[in-house]
Every structure is written in C-alpha cells, then in structure tokens.
Image: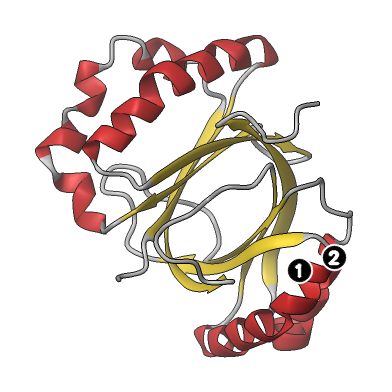
Amino acid sequence: MTTPLLYTAELDLPEEDIEPFLQWYAYRHAPDVYQVGFQTCSCYRVLDGDMNLFDLYEMPSWDLFETPRYLGMRGRDPYVDALMRKRRNKAHTVYDQCVIAPDLAGPCLDADWISVLRFAVPEETDEVIAELLTRHQPLLTASGLKRIRFATRGRDHPRNPTFRPRCMVVAEWDDRPSEDGSGIPDLLFDAAGDAIEDDTAFVGRRVYPWPDRPG
C-alpha cells in the first residue's frame, strides 16, 4: 500500500472564534473532507505555537487536490468563508512521510496529544534522521510515545504555497508529553547537529475527534 501524504492546515483565530470553528469543523468540514477522499482528519488545539489550531490529514495522493469533488467543496459550504475571513494567519503544507513507526496497516492518526518539531536540514541528512527515529522508537514508546512520524515537504498545495521549513517530526501521545519531547530533539541533534535551522516546536491537544481521555 502506498504511504499516504501528510497534509497540515494551520490557522490562528481570535479566542472568541475558536468554538464556532470547532463546531463547523466537526459538523461540516470533517464530513466533507472524508467524502472527497481524505483518509484521516483531526484537529488539535495548539499550546505555545504561532497559530492556535493545527489540522492534520492523510490523503492518498496529491492529485486529490485537482478532483472535481475537492475543487467544489468550498463552493458547497455556506459557512466556510465567514469563518476563514477571521484568520489572522494561515499555513498549508503537504508532506511525504518518510517514517511512520510503528508502521500500522493503512492510514492512522489517533492520539489525544501531539508534539510537533519543524526544522530545516540538508537532504543528505534525511536518511540518518529516519534511521535514528526508527531505531529509537521502542525506547520512546517506553516513555509514553504512541507513534512517531518524520516527513519532508512535497509538492505545494495548488493554491496555498507554504512558508514552513522542509522537515517535520510529529510524535503522537496518549498523555501530554514532557517539555523535552522525551529525547526526540536530542536524536535530531545527534543526526544533524549544527545543520539544523529554522526549528520550532509546539504541543497540541486533540479537539476533533473528541479525545479518548476527557479533561
């Protein structure tokens, strides 16, 4: 089975507009994206990031963006334009997934918490990062990790080019991760050292679908 693409859609909304967004996301947007062919769909409330909402999707191929169903989705949604006009910032990024560990059959994004590291490194470092994360995944799992993904930017969204750096590591957790990411930044430094640039990090809690552990 071909590895799905990872697609992130980020936005920053005033606090008073977040609850209407979440209602729209759950009751209109998520059903729409599944109907046009997305394989997974989730939304996270970001803590300490430059935007406060982080949508995470898996999709079978970039070509989905050019299908009539996808192209017509916004026109069929009478609510989206009013919500999107309230954005203070946005970013849409398409990634190729280099590592999913442990690798499960089929697409799967199912964690109450994520930690996200974004950074730029030379392409020749990618294989070293992939090998280190794969090799250390069992040790990270012992500290509460559910799954880890390493992804690199692919072809841009056809209408929304991104400003995010080339690489991203998404770690999935059942509980809020520790501030140091349980050693993941250290592994990246071991792989790339001073070659790492433009690095940022944040933690997010799932708001769609509802988290498995309330509170």
The residue sitting at 53% across, 90% down in the picture is: 124
Mark 1, Cα crowd under 10 Å, few <14 / some 14-19 / many 20+, is some
Residue under numbered circle 2: 143
**Residue drawn at 74 percent across, 46 percent down:** 203
Residue 158 drawn at (x, y percent): 26, 48
Q: Amino acid at mark 1?
A: Thr
Q: Nearer the viewer, residue 57 or 210?
A: 210
Q: Residues within 10 Å of mark 2 (few under 14, many from 20)?
A: some
- Residue 27 vs residue 69: left or right? right
Asked if labels 1 and 2 touch by Cβ distance under 8 angstroms, the answer is yes
Q: Is residue 189 left or right of residue 93?
A: right
Q: Determine whether, in the image, residue 56 is placed left or right of residue 210.
A: left
Location of the C terminus by quadrant is top right
Q: How many marks?
A: 2
The residue under the point 54% across, 55% down is 164
Q: Is residue 28 above or below residue 50?
A: above
Residue reaching furthest right? 179
- Name the mark on residue 202: none
* Distance from Cα at disc 2 to Cα at disc 1: 5 Å
Q: Examine the rendering and report whether any part of residue 185 can be seen.
A: no
Residue at 35% from the left image edge and 15% from the top image edge: 81
Marker disc for residue 141: 1
What is the secondary structure assignment of the residue under circle 1? helix
Locate residue 57, reporting x and y percent.
Answer: 44, 46
